[in-house]
Amino acid sequence: MARLQILELPEGAGDDRPPFILVIDEVAYDNPVYERFVEDSELAAGLANRVGAQAVLLFEDTIDIPANDLTLTHVQEAADGNVIRLRVEPDLEGFTETVMTEVAKAQAEVIAARQQGGLR
């Protein structure tokens, strides 16, 4: 199943929000989405424009972006001298499916707009 990640870029002087690249990885080369992205560069540009990204990158391999590690660890020493470690991991079950559904909707809208001549 494909994954979505955000790669934050350094902010410029006039940026209202931090610029970013949408990274989609673990997409098989024989996946129709991968084939459409390779064949139609405007599809990726349209998706990037719609979500506010600088670009959309698609990979078959797993791309690990260290800044996206959401695991939090807190270490504290208790009054009795024992060390307490608390590890918090996010529950993102269903998140990927929800985002991929929204990406598919956005792709369909880009294709429809392109067919109607609204996107060049």
Image (cartoon, rainbow, N blue to C red):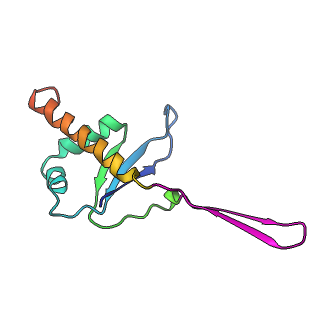
59 lies above or below 83: above
Q: 31 above or below 85?
A: above
**On the picture, is 40 further left or further right than 9?**
left
- Give whichever of 82, 14 is nearer the camera: 82
Q: Residue at x 22, y 41 (%)?
A: 107
Residue 34 in percent (x, y) is at 19, 56
Q: Left or right: 95 with respect to 14?
A: left
Image position of 36 with respect to 113: above or below: below
Q: Which residues are magenta?
A: 70-92
Specify whether residue 75 is painted magenta: yes
Residue 91 belongs to magenta span: yes
Of the 4 image quadrants, the one containing the C terminus is top left
Q: Position of residue 43 (x, y in %)?
A: 20, 42
Q: Quadrant of residue 62?
A: bottom left
Q: Nearer the viewer, residue 29 or 90?
A: 90
Q: Is residue 110 above or below residue 40?
A: above
Q: Quadrant of the N terminus?
A: bottom left
- Residue located at (18% from left, 64% from top): 29
Q: Would you say residue 100 is visible in this rendering?
A: yes
The residue that appears at 14% across and 32% down in the rendered structure is 112
Left or right: 76 with respect to 112?
A: right
In this view, the residue farthest toward the bottom is 82
Q: Residue at x 46, y 54 (%)?
A: 92
> What number of labels is visible?
0
Q: x and y percent of residue 109 in the render?
A: 20, 34
